[in-house]
Image (spheres, helix red, strand yellow):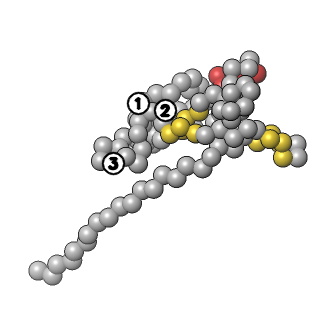
Amino acid sequence: MAITSAVCNSFKQELLQGYHSFNASGDTPAGNAFKLALYTSSATINKSTTAYSATNEISNTSGSAYSAGGIALTNITPVLDSDTAICDFSNYELVVCFFYSERLFNL
């Protein structure tokens, strides 16, 4: 399969049922914890996805840039921008560098 850009149907339903709070942690009620996970193109993630899965998640075996289980997002209390409700999260920077040496030989 493939990764499809979509909001999970179960999440949409849970929003209307009041299961999720996007408030900052110091607000009343305190917000829920949200995480962002990174996956390879082999992952099957779509609107029917209902929960986090470690299957085909990016693995980082040679450093600390990314840990399996997702990156914790910091909630910022939702606001209205004109007629649009916005929930912003604090920025998170994931820096990846590749170094290599290319040598050309004339034989």
Instruction: Find the residue positioned furthest to the bottom.
Output: 106
On screen, residue 35 versus residue 25, left or right, reads left
Q: Foreground: 64 or 25?
A: 25
* Separation (CA) of disc 1 from disc 3: 20 Å
Instruction: Single out the mark in the foreground, 2 or 1.
Output: 1
Q: Which residue is mark 2?
A: 44
Where residue 22 appears, as percent x and y from the top left, is 70, 32
Against 76, residue 97 (above or below) is below
Mark 3 lies on a secondary structure that is loop
**CB contact under 8 Å: marks 2 and 1:** yes
Label 2, residues with CA under 10 Å away: few <14, some 14-19, many ≥20 = some
Q: Which residue is mark 1?
A: 55
Instruction: Single out the mark in the foreground, 2 or 3.
Output: 3
On-image quarter of the C terminus = bottom left
Q: Residue at x 42, y 56 (%)?
A: 96
Instruction: Find the residue positioned furthest to the left.
Output: 107
Mark 2 lies on a secondary structure that is loop
Q: Residue at x 74, y 20 (%)?
A: 18
Label located before the other in sequence (2 or 3)? 2
Label 3, residues with CA under 10 Å away: few <14, some 14-19, many ≥20 = few
Where residue 14 appears, as percent x and y from the top left, is 69, 21
On screen, residue 65 versus residue 36, left or right, reads left
Q: Which residue is mark 3?
A: 63
**CB contact under 8 Å: marks 2 and 3:** no
Against 61, residue 21 (above or below) is above
Mark 1 lies on a secondary structure that is loop
Give the residue type at disc 2: Thr
Give the residue type at disc 3: Gly
Q: Foreground: 32 or 107?
A: 32
Label located before the other in sequence (1 or 3)? 1
Label located before the other in sequence (2 or 1)? 2
Where residue 46 appears, as percent x and y from the top left, is 57, 32
